[in-house]
Image (cartoon, rainbow, N blue to C red):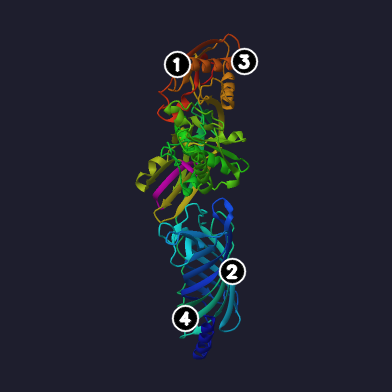
């Protein structure tokens, strides 16, 4: 190929021996083909590097592009070449088994030596953009160098196991090629960045058209995949067909006519004043806004587990799973309004989001199966959760430990189908307490008592008013506006305008209101004027925890604990945190009514006793915590309600786990001037 290029250059240089025409800009199509070498290092089998590695591969990349060049942008010999186009990159990796390979021949009833080859093929499509600095060595020769980048809008990877020799041998199913399900999973990186060095020779085909052969070397800075460092370099040949338009010579301007001074414009003046109006209806340079803020805080418990169907390692459809694009836009607002059960069905994404924002946190996944399932399912289930966090949330594999066993959740009784269903799970555990903590959300409601604003415009227009407008804004946010034409200008603009602003429109963080006036007269002249008024903001903020309400002089607090251990009446760390929060809000002489609950497993008598035990645990801790604060006169009512199936569906294992809890309703005198 290189010999052909040299021959073309020698022949066409004689054909185009005429002196080249000076060029200021060139543009046209280009095409090239490059081959090269790529280097990665990833295992043939996912997670087992000792079974073989893919290390070195080949690269082939055809390209087409549109080229624009400014040959002398920085002087006689230095210019810029820009190109935008499309490329297809094909990566080919090959590896071989580490041990000797044999197949059983049923005809001779012997083992036959075979050659197997592992192949990893990747194909990508890119939209590319390059910007090169070009130095002209002579009238025809030039060299260029610069960065190139692109966007990979499509990528596909396939790993296969192949029988190469003997040519008449195949796998047991008669196929010579198998797609490898346990191979390494790769995903393409969207953005590409690299550098290019090239040498080119311009061959004049006509006065304005040039054929430009080019030799180029490219190197990638960014790996084309997310999972590893994968570098490549390629060399290729290409041709561009460039057209240089003739230089534009402006025609001489006609002689200017004799200058005549325009008549003076009619007078147009505009001004505006903005004032606040106090309680006595008098104008003031300041306006007072009373802002009452109520902050509602809510803690939703998180059941950190995923429950599977019998004999399955697939995550059930009731659990929400997002793709990589959705996870990049994910925030806590997406799950802030969910209840405990719905939040559990989003547990993978909530944990993935927190691990992305807590780079030091580590996670342990405990896979478990029921006694009537294969033992291998435990590890497969935990691996399925890990792969989702790694592939979709881009969590480093080294931060996730996969184990088998019950983990932090007590194993349920296998005597019933409900108990067995609860043992088909993956439980989450972490030493970082915030990683699996309840979801804390906050909502702010503001009640404004806004002032009245008085506007005083003043306009003088000798030619008459064509149109006008007044806008009242806070920063860039428009709160109110008036506008009109000359016919209706007299009344609004010659009197004071008073507005009472809507509190929902105003921002309590900004301290000024601005009035803008514009007016246009019948000749097209336009004038503007502005004036501002300072705002005095008076805040009154109250924090309201979830489950609080006030009726007259009575305040009622409602708190719930969920997810007690199987057949357990003892709480955990999250329960203790909620109890301390509730105890801090109980005052003297409060009435405390506590009810315990269980799931539907077990007979009624046992469930009544277990639910009462959970209620008594909650009552005992509240007594201890309130006594430490000096609270007296509390009256407790304790009840065991048995199985609860109203809030959480007990036909789901996660619903049964959430049903194991207790609720407390506290009735007490409201604080004077307090809020619910």
Distance between the Cα atoms at labels 2 and 4?
Answer: 28 Å
Q: Which residue corresponds to mark 2?
A: 146
Residue 398 location, x and y as percent?
60, 46
As drawn, the label of residue 375 is none
The region drawn magenta spans 463-478
Name the element at disc 1: strand
Dot in front, 1 or 4:
1
**Residue that appears at 47% across and 81% down:** 246
Residue 624 disc label: 3
Q: Which is nearer the eye, 666 or 670?
A: 666
Which residue is nearer to you in this view: 330 or 164? Answer: 164
Q: Which residue is mark 4?
A: 246
From where the camera sits, is residue 384 visible? yes
Considering only vertical position in the picture, is 514 above or below 579?
below
Q: Secondary structure at mark 3?
A: helix
Q: Main secondary structure of the magenta part?
A: strand
Q: Which residue is mark 1?
A: 641
Q: CA distance from mark 3 to mark 1?
A: 24 Å
Residue 339 appears in the rendering: no
Instruction: First in sequence, mark 3 or 1: give its number.
Output: 3
């Amino acid at each position: 190929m290189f010999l052909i290029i040299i021959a073309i250059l020698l022949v066409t240089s004689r054909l185009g021996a005429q002196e080249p025409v000076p060029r200021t800009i060139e543009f046209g199509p280009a095409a090239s083909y490059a081959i090269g070498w790529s280097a990665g290092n990833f295992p043939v089998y996912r997670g087992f590097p000792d079974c073989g590695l893919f290390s070195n591969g080949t690269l082939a990349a055809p390209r087409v592009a549109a080229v624009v060049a400014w040959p002398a942008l920085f002087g006689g010999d230095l210019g810029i070449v820009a190109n935008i186009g499309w490329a297809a990159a094909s990566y080919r990796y090959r590896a071989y088994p580490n041990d000797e390979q044999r197949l059983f021949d049923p005809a001779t009833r012997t083992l036959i030596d075979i050659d197997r080859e592992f192949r990893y093929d990747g194909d990508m499509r890119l939209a590319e953009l390059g910007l090169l600095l070009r130095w002209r060595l002579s009238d025809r020769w030039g060299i260029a160098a610069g960065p190139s980048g692109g966007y990979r809008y499509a990528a596909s990877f396939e790993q296969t196991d192949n029988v190469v020799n003997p040519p008449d041998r195949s796998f047991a199913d008669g196929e010579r090629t198998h797609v490898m399900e346990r191979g390494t999973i790769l995903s393409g990186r969207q953005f590409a960045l690299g550098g290019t060095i090239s040498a080119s020779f311009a061959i004049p085909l006509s006065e304005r058209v040039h054929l430009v052969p080019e030799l180029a070397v490219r190197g990638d800075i960014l790996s084309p995949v997310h999972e590893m460092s994968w570098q490549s370099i390629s060399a290729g040949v290409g041709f561009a067909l460039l057209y240089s338009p003739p230089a534009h010579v402006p025609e001489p301007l006609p002689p200017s006519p004799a200058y005549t001074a325009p008549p003076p414009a009619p007078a147009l003046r505009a001004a505006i004043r903005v004032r606040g109006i106090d309680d006595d209806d008098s104008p003031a340079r300041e306006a007072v806004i009373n802002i009452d803020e109520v902050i509602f805080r809510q803690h939703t418990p998180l059941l950190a587990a995923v429950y599977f169907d019998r004999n399955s390692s697939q995550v059930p459809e009731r659990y929400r799973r997002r793709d990589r694009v959705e996870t990049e836009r994910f925030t806590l607002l997406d799950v802030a309004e969910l209840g405990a059960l719905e939040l559990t069905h989003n547990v993978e994404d909530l944990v993935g989001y927190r691990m992305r924002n807590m780079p030091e946190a580590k996670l342990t996944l405990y896979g478990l199966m029921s006694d009537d399932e294969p033992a291998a399912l435990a590890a497969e289930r935990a691996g399925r959760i890990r792969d989702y966090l790694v592939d979709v949330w881009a969590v480093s594999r080294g931060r996730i430990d996969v184990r088998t066993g019950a983990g932090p959740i007590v194993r349920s009784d296998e005597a019933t189908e409900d108990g067995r269903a609860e043992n088909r799970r993956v439980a989450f555990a972490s030493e970082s307490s915030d990683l699996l903590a309840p979801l804390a959300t906050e909502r702010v409601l503001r009640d404004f008592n806004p002032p009245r604003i008085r506007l005083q415009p003043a306009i003088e227009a000798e030619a008459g008013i064509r149109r006008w407008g007044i806008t009242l804004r806070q920063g860039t946010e428009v709160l109110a506006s008036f506008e009109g034409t000359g016919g209706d200008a007299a009344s609004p603009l010659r009197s004071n305008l008073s507005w009472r602003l809507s509190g929902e429109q105003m921002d309590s963080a900004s301290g000024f209101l601005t009035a803008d006036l514009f007016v246009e007269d019948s000749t097209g002249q336009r004038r503007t004027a502005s004036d501002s008024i300072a705002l005095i903001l008076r805040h009154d903020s109250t924090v309201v925890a979830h489950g609080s309400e006030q009726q007259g002089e009575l305040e009622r607090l409602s708190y719930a604990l969920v997810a007690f251990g199987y057949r357990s009446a003892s709480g955990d760390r999250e329960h203790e945190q909620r109890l301390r929060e509730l105890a801090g809000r109980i005052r003297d002489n409060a009435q405390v009514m506590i009810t315990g609950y269980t799931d539907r497993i077990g007979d009624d008598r046992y469930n009544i006793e277990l639910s009462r035990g959970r209620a008594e645990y909650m009552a005992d801790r509240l007594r201890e915590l309130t006594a430490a604060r000096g609270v007296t006169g509390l009256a407790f009512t304790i009840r065991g309600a048995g199985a609860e199936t109203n809030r959480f569906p007990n036909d789901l294992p996660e619903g049964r786990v959430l049903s194991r809890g207790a609720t407390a309703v506290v009735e007490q005198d409201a604080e004077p001037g307090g809020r619910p």
